[in-house]
Image (cartoon, grey):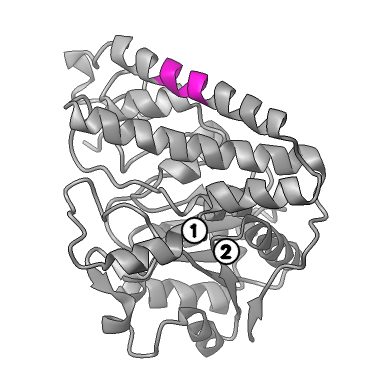
Amino acid sequence: MTAQFTLGTNPTAEPALLHEMYRKMYLIRSFETACSENYGLGLIHGFLHLYSGQEAIAVGSLSSLRADDIVVTHYRDHGHAIARGLETKNIMAELFGRSTGVSGGKGGSMHLFDVSRHFMGGHAIVGAQLPLAAGLALSIKYRKQDRISIVFFGDGAVSQGTFHETMNLAALWKLPLLFFLENNLYGMGTHVNLTQAGGTDIYKVAQNYGIEGVLVDGMDILAVHEVTQRATERMRSGSGPALIEAKTFRFEGHSMADPTQYRDHSEVDHWRKKDPIKKFPEFLLENGLITDQEIEAIKIAVDEEIALAVDYAQSSPVPDADQLLSDIYA
């Protein structure tokens, strides 16, 4: 079964949750801005893929999950990590390659982990996270636990064999696995129209495996929250896997090394008008769910947190040499 989902005009969530949703989205955007600045200063090395523009997906979906649900994601993982509750100072320290980082300073931007929060990465190989998430979902089912596994991936991963193999096994075994496709329309520099023979609405592929596929506006945090909540409620009742496709857009390049010459300015401007960092607080103000003073207080607190995170990362030590052979396979 496939369906398209659009949110109604009025949210049903409590104002406290709505405020927290905005805070986390603003926190992710501010974190990514700080990452860009410190990459330019040479303090962050290696690949750096920013999540700016896609914040409504991470916050909207993960705010619908329980604390013991398992999260697996791709290399554009800062947003998911922050939405899951990982400390910004420890994430920033990881990007700086410091021992206080979430992966001990040895994983970097693409390999953020926190087992205590059931956040299982951060995986650099396109599509490699899909079968891992299925294995975790199989473990949940084997143990008869009331949990789910969610796996985030981009439109580029849909062309990988692991996507179809995992979809097939998840459907056969009725695994509690939620496939969450963040379709930002570009796999590196190639538009999805040039990579998907079936068209841009990838969610329809779910019907080939007998599972539900849903399309949602990935720039609408309330729509993402609601559709994820509905999907997970059905999965907890034993309905098996589901697929959500969220249409979204990354405002920056594929990575910091990408000049984005393949995109017209008009396309970027079109999507920036849908920026959830701007549209969501406007919606809350219009509906009397937040005040200008509360928005300003959130921004001030977030700016202070990001500044402290950068200071913490800069002052943290690099890993000791005796850690070189730890946390690896023999």
Going 58% across and 48% down the picture, which residue do you hit?
A: 59
Asked if residue 307 is among those painted magenta in the image, a careful observer would answer yes
Please identify the quarter of the rendering in which residue 313 is found.
Answer: top left
Is residue 23 in view from this perspective? yes
Between residues 125 and 32, which one lies in front from this camera angle? 32
Name the residue located 33 percent from the left edge and 84 percent from the top edge: 196
Residue at x 31% of width, y 43% of height: 110
Which amino acid type corresponds to the residue marked 2 in the rendered image? Leu
Q: Residue 57's spot in the image, x, y percent?
A: 54, 55
Magenta stretch: helix, strand or loop mostly: helix
Give x and y (percent) for residue 198: 39, 90
Range drawn in magenta: 303-309
Quarter of the rendering occupied by the N terminus: bottom right
Secondary structure under tag 2 reads: strand
- Residue 151 is labelled as 1
Crowding at mark 2 (Cα within 10 Å: few <14, some 14-19, many 20+): many
Residue occupied by mark 2 = 177
Q: Decide if residue 231 is on the left or right side of residue 131.
A: right
Quarter of the figure that contains the C terminus: top left
Looking at the image, residue 38 sits to the left or right of residue 150; the answer is left
Cβ atoms at labels 2 and 1 below 8 Å apart? yes
